[in-house]
Amino acid sequence: LLIDAAELRLVRLPLLTPFVISTGTMTEKVFPLLVLKSGGLEGISEGVMDVLPDYLEETVAGTLDFMTTYLLPQVVGKRFASPADLEPVLAPWRGNRMARAAVEMAFWDLWAKSLDQPLQAVLGGRGDAIDVGVSLGIASIETTLERVAASVEAGYKRVKLKIRQGHDVEMVAAVRAAFPHAKLTVDANTDYGLVDLPVLRALDDFNLDYIEQPLAFDDIHDHAQVQAALKTAICLDESIRTAVDARKALESRAGRVINIKVGRVGGHREARAIHDVSAAFGAPVWCGGMLEAGIGRAHNIHLATLPNFTKPGDTSSASRYFARDIVNEPLEAVGGRMPVPRNGAGIGVTLDRPYLETVSTLVQEMRP
Ligand code: OSB
Ligand code: MG
């Protein structure tokens, strides 16, 4: 496949409700959108980095610079036979996995389209829909109870509650009391340390399916100390960037579940490698999200059809986040099941170009 052009846009989509996690509040979703073109076909991806380096280190501004100066000139005008063939171009760079993922994922979409196959088929997944849950941002206990009720009512398969210091045990106790049978998890986004073991032990009493990323974004070792002290499984998100990280974490028992975000780990190949190494350890995985719009969500859904994605993912209905999406196809869950989009090959969704123009600016249109 000859990449004959690349189009890089910066998109700003307002969120319907501010999304609050332990590290900050998001009121709009700002992301780079990348389109790789080849002989009339378009492969599309979203970058999942934030404006500020508060989830992981990468930023939108840094990514736009890295892409326009290095990554895109490395691929535009070049031929790649398969995603494996693209790997040597992306592999030398340290970190920057979100930026690399954007290029890699756009190429997978393009490649699947060139083979006239759905993305899930070329990744090795199957099935028409995936199980999904919701991720509820930090809010008052009263608001949280209302949101949990609405999510359970809508049939979502699990409810993930964002926690932070001082907004944890009491809130989870209230939710558990009101919903004794709901599948509940919590996500701390790194807000705790080893000194907070008493709080984490208190959370151990609520029959949570897992506690997501309690400790630092770059830690594996201390998570093992905490995991040894809890019956509840720890799920790692921020600390897992590669299949090697996953192996080390599972080998050292730093957790028993892994949240795979294709955009965090450098693309579908690394995501699949993490999926495979987790399966070898008997550790379930699930597909996380970064409040992506329709392009990123479609990638997540296709990936989540691989067999070891046995826990519900975070790709809930797009209408929970956005008044209008940048794709034409509605990505809406029904009874906690998200259908795999199949409007054409690849990711199975198409850009709503007129709307995209109104919510984005062109950063670069590159030709060889
Ligand atoms: O830790 O999973 C996370 C959103 C932004 C940053 C980090 C996280 C999240 C979510 C939302 O939990 C998942 C989604 O609905 O896309
Ligand atoms: Mg998380």
Image (cartoon, rainbow, N blue to C red):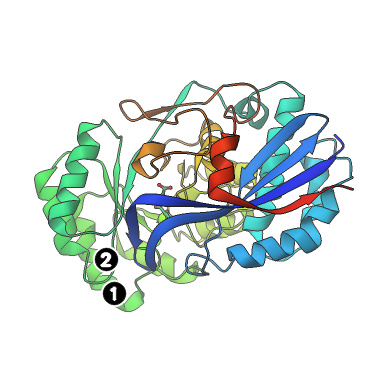
> What crowding class fits label 1: few (fewer than 14 Cα within 10 Å), some (14-19), or many (20 or more)?
some
Going 60% across and 28% down the picture, which residue do you hit? 120
Residue 362 visible at all: yes
- Location of the N terminus (image quadrant): top right
Give above or below for 276 relative to 8.
Answer: above
Check mark 2 vs ligand 2: CB closer than 8 Å? yes or no. Answer: no
Count the marks: how many?
A: 2
Secondary element at image label 2: helix
Mark 2: amino acid: Leu
Where in the figure is residue 22, as x and y percent of width and height? 34, 66
Q: Is residue 336 left or right of residue 326?
A: left
Q: Quadrant of ligand 2?
A: bottom left
Task: Say the numbered circle drawn on residue 52.
Answer: none
> Residue most toward the bottom?
195
Mark 1: amino acid: Asp
Residue tagged by mark 1?
A: 196
Whether tag 1 and tag 2 are in contact, CB under 8 A, the answer is yes
Q: Is residue 62 left or right of residue 238?
A: right
Task: Say the numbered circle drawn on residue 200.
Answer: 2
Q: Residue 65 versus residue 232: which sits nearer the camera?
A: 65
Give above or below for 151 relative to 114.
Answer: below
Q: Residue 294 versus residue 94: which sits nearer the camera?
A: 294
Going 24% across and 65% down the picture, which residue do you hit? 201
